[in-house]
Image (spheres, rainbow, N blue to C red):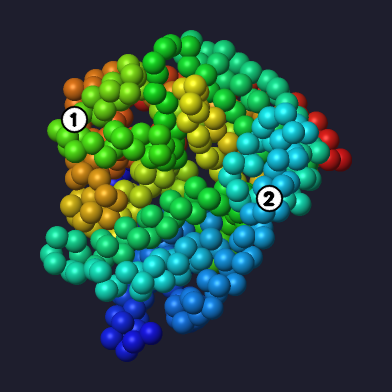
Amino acid sequence: MNEEKLRGALRHGLSIRTFSREDRQAVLAKVKGETRMRRKWTAGAALALALLAVCATALAVAAHYGILDFVGSGDVPPAELTRIAGHIQNDVGSVETDLFTIDVREAYYDGEMLLLAVDYIPKEKNVMLLSRDFEFDEDRFAWLANDDSYGDKTGLDVYREAGYEKLYTIEMHVFDAEEERSEFSTSNAVLNKDGTLTEYYSLAGMTRRESMTLRITGLFIEDPTPEVREDFQDPVTHDIWHEVDKIFDVQIPDKAC
Amino acid sequence: MNDAKDARLEQMMDAYGTAVLNLCAMLLRDAHLAQDASQDTFVKAYKSLDGFRGDGETSERAWLMRIAVNTCRDYRRSAWWRLTRRREPLEELADVAAQTSEEERGVLAQVQRLPAKLREAVLLCYVEEMTAQEAAQALGIRRSSVYRRLDRAKRLLRISLEGGVEHE
């Protein structure tokens, strides 16, 4: 990638939008109305959280597990959760690679949007997993991140203290195989206590169809040169890229149709 | 609100409003969410103004960009559902599509697909022209990490724009 070409495209593309007068007025209004808004929001939030807790519990009991694990996100309106729960498909498919089992554990498809919960299960022991947008589990590893002597440690030193021997970054993407597109996709990852990593994918704005073909493709990135790692937040440096391309296709019927 | 703080807020919005908006747009990959996040950034900055001292260690720009980056991280963590519902990729906006070449839109699209931490470094260094030190302050990482993230971003962009996977 030519650096100047990159700079030019970004500058030109981003020069078109500006922080508008309306944006400024919205900021000033928010600053002025902060106290009043906060009181309103606190009452509204308490009610919403109470409703969500009741709904989430009921749904968890009904479905036994999962519901795309959205319940834990705390960001889905109860009515939406109820609707989603009715269209969940479990155990959509799985595939084996040399390094991982990739398990598409849950799927929701309504003809226009696809939501997936995909588990990445390492075959090796004591493996730390990261994902492309993974935010480190600060609660779980706070004792390491806040260690006073952390500044003198390599990334792998830190991981080894937690019992890990290898590190992979998972950069996998979900495609609508028929339309060959993933530009509307988003993902969010959670590192589970058992060492597996669950990634939640979504594809939105799809052309409505009664079923779709799913493809997951991407890279497992391994760093075998721990001596050059020097910070905790970005331990991957000299990578080995394990390409995983067109792992599997699966038909997901639109249960909402 | 007091007059001095108000004036400072106005100055910051004048100087950095568009930069913050664009940073948020690229980090969130959604034009509408970016508006919300950029506004939230200035609201947070306003609240923290009393505690910020531009002492040469951290510039006002780096401080503001750090607030923007953290705001976007919060959005990504908490608003996945909203992202699935409201996505409006930057390169597909009518004004952007009309005024940029197909090649430029392709680059914009691929940069938006970079992992978030790589995108942050690319935006700060290549669009905002921050030094590696400033970007490091804005991101709360070491300068060497900024260089590594830029290097890795370029490798990924080379693959996505020119095809093929690099093997080492």
Q: On the picture, is A122 further left or further right than B83? A: left
Residue at image coords 45%, 33% = A131
Residue A144 is situated, as x and y percent measured from the top left of the image, at: 29, 33
Residue B105 visible within the image: no
Q: Nearer the viewer, residue A217 or A41?
A: A41
Find disc 2 in the rendering and name its residue.
Answer: A52
Do marks 2 and 1 share a subunit? yes
Looking at numbered disc 2 in the image, what kind of residue is underneath it?
Answer: Leu
Left or right: B88 in relation to A89:
left
Q: Where does residue B35 sit, x and y in percent of width and height?
A: 50, 66
What's under tag 1, amino acid-wise?
A: Lys
Q: The numbered mark 2 sits on a residue in which chain?
A: A
Mark 1 neighbour class, 10 Å CA radius: few under 14, some 14 to 19, many 20 or more: some
- Return the disc, 2 or 1, that comes first in the chain's sequence: 2
Name the one closer to the observer, A179 or B57: B57
Chain of residue at mark 1? A
- From the image, state whether disc 2 or disc 1 is nearer to you: 2
Measure how far apart labels 2 and 1 are at the Cα level.
42 Å
- Residue drawn at (70%, 43%) of the image: A56
Q: Quadrant of the C terminus of chain B?
A: top left
Residue at left offset 48%, top offset 26%: A193
* Tag count: 2
The residue at the far bottom in this view is B3
A32 lies above or below B124: below
Percent coordinates x, y for residue A138 in the rendering = 38, 40
* Residue A37 in sight from this viewpoint: yes
Against A103, residue A1 (above or below) is below
Question: What SS does tag 2 mark?
Answer: helix
Label annotation for residue A64: none
**B140 shown above or below A125:** below
The crowd level at tag 2 (other Cα within 10 Å; few <14, some 14-19, many 20+) is many
Q: Which residue is mark 1?
A: A153
